[in-house]
Structures are given as C-alpha cells and as structure tokens.
Amino acid sequence: IVLTQSPDSLAVSLGERATINCKSSQSAFYSSNNKNYLAWYQQKPGQPPKLLIYWASTRESGVPDRFSGSGSGTDFTLTISSLQAEDVAVYYCQQYNISPTWTFGQGTRVEIK
Amino acid sequence: EVQLVESGGGLVKPGGSLTLSCAASGFTFSSYSMIWVRQAPGKGLEWVSSISSNSRNTYYADSVKGRFTISRDNAKNSLYLQMNSLRVEDTAVYYCVRGGTTMTTEFHSWGQGTLVTVSS
C-alpha cells in the first residue's frame, strides 16, 4: 500500500481552515462492517505522535472538535476548521486494514502564516 | 492512564545487536496487540513490527525481516525488540505503541521513544 499526502506542507493564518489530503493505492473500506480503516496522527516537535482520528472520521477522546476527518475508499481528508497556534505539527495518515502491514503517509507539515 | 516506557537504546556499531524493552502500565497488557514504530532523524514514521496479544502472531516490515524479533512477556507487562545485524539505516527513535484487541487497529497510545544510533 502507498499512502500519498498532499500537500507536503502548508502555511495557514490563525483562525483559518487547514485541509490535508491522503490518497491510498488500495481501498481502506470494508463492506462487512462499513468502516474505513484510516487514522490520522499529530506529531508536535520533540513529541511522539498522537492519535487524532480513527475509522476515518471518529475523533479520539479529548481531541478538539475543530479536527475532523472525512472520506471513504481511497481518498481521505483531515480538516482543521480554525487553526490554533498549538496545532503547528506534522500530520500523518495511516491505513490499518491490510494486515500484516501498517502504512503511513509521508506527513504534512502545518505552520502558521 | 496508559503509560509506555521504552529503554535499551544507545550507540552500536554496524553489525551489532541491541534489545529494546517497553514497560507498560495503565491497561490490561495481555489483551492488546503491541507494535514498534520507528522514525529516522528528520523523517516520517515507519512501522517496524507487531505482535498479537497472545504472541501467536508476529509481523515484520520487509526492511527488518530476518534481523529483528518482537516478543512480549504478559506476566511482566513488557514488550521487547531484539535487533541483530544492525545497519546505519536502522538509526531512529523507536516507539512502543499499544494497538487494539485485534491486529487491524489504529495505534492508540505511544511511548516517548528510545534513540538507536548505528554508527562506526
């Protein structure tokens, strides 16, 4: 599986929307349970990654609702509705339905304009 | 609260060996799959290896297959990664990660990582 994120980096003004795309070479959707096996992680400088979104659109407990995930099949999007200073980070998508491999996208760096 | 604490990293020469450990707490360790993920300096995330809750199933990235061995001791709430024939390109921060009760799962909780440097 290859996960391709776009863009590689983006600069957004505080309070503006940030959108990150993730395209997979294989479908993340399982019709048996109607779920997309796609997650998003946030990694701030000097910290380990943190799970933000799983099942493509389910927010992890404690994650602010300005973060949302969407998409199905092979095309997915992470949206930060109103960028805050603490959202500066690298964001990764991950597909986890093709055991025994777990694949990450190359990452997208989000900065303040 | 889930806590994962890695140890065992350090400087090793090419061709050498190292064993990483991860001490887990705050959850029922024996119920969850566990994973190692690495990140080379300034690079992205790379899945390394996974192990099922009962150790019956283990999986490896092609880049480490035949050189690394993942194992766990549910009685000690501990995860291990035995790394042999180390290469310069294995230099990375290695993260211990908690998965789910099945193998096809997102990576829920991450340790702080331990740095492995392979250099002569």
Image (tube, coloured by chain):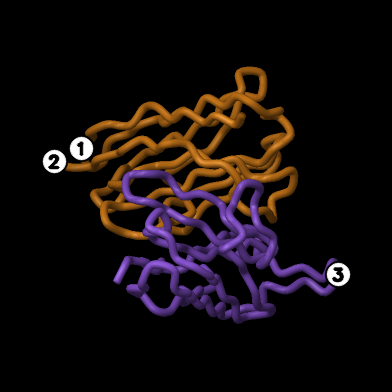
Q: Which residue is mark 3?
A: A32
- Which amino acid is tagged 3? Ser
Mark 1 touching mark 3, by CB under 8 A?
A: no
Colour of chain B, in one word, is orange
Give the percent coordinates (x, y) of residue B41.
Answer: 26, 52
Query: Looking at this rendering, what residue extends furthest in the front direction?
Result: A15
- Which amino acid is tagged 2? Ser
User: Going by the image, does A12 lie left or right of B108?
Assistant: left
Q: CA distance from mark 2 to mark 3?
A: 51 Å
Q: Nearer the viewer, mark 1 or mark 3?
A: 3
Measuring 48% from the left and 54% from the top, which residue is drawn there?
B47
Q: Which residue is mark 1?
A: B13
Q: In the image shown, does B25 or A91 lie closer to the viewer?
A: A91
Give the percent coordinates (x, y) of residue B32.
Answer: 69, 38
Q: Residues within 10 Å of mark 2 (few under 14, many from 20)?
A: few
Q: Are marks 2 and 1 on the same chain?
A: yes
Query: Looking at this rendering, what residue extends furthest in the top direction?
Result: B76
